[in-house]
Image (cartoon, grey):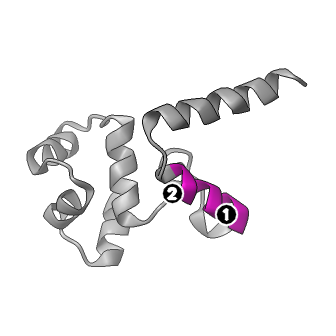
Amino acid sequence: MYGKISVWREEKGWTENKLCDMAGVSHSMFHSWLSRGTMPKLDTLESLCYALDKPLAALLFDVDENKLTGEEIQLLSRWKQLDIRQKKVIMDTIEAFGKTE
């Protein structure tokens, strides 16, 4: 996971500190995750991906963002703009559709 973040960061020509600033993540917390190999919270990963202009799915599920359809990219882009409550409503709706089959 950190390998992908590092590659994406380097593609932008950013230092780790620049990434932290752009994502609104504490520098010390970021370096602590790296040194301990621990997993940050999902909202933190989302902030890092947002700063790097990468979909969270590409980080979490080993999805090649270059193979996403236009519709999937649009969906992920809009997802990033939602607050926690709105995301829960969407997830509940998706779950409800899955139960009707």
x then y, percent, for residue 26: 14, 47
Comparing 19 with 31, the one in front is: 19
User: Is 59 positioned to the left or the right of 41 in the image?
Assistant: right
- Magenta residues? 68-79
Taking depth in this image into account, of 57 and 4 the one nearest to the observer is 57
Which kind of residue does numbered mark 2 sit on? Answer: Pro
Q: Is residue 62 magenta?
A: no
Q: Secondary structure at mark 1?
A: loop
37 lies above or below 30? above
Question: Toward which corner of the image does residue 20 lie, by quadrant?
Answer: bottom left
* Amino acid bearing label 1: Leu
Q: Circle 2 is placed at which residue position?
A: 55
The residue under label 1 is: 68
Task: Please report the residue visible at 18 percent of the width from the left and 69 percent of the height from the top.
Answer: 15
Q: Which image quarter: residue 70? A: bottom right
Q: Could you tell which of marks 2 and 1 lies nearer the N-terminus?
A: 2
Q: Quadrant of residue 84?
A: top left
| Residue 29 placement (x, y as % from top left) | 14, 42
Q: Residue at the spot x=25%, y=38% of the render? A: 37
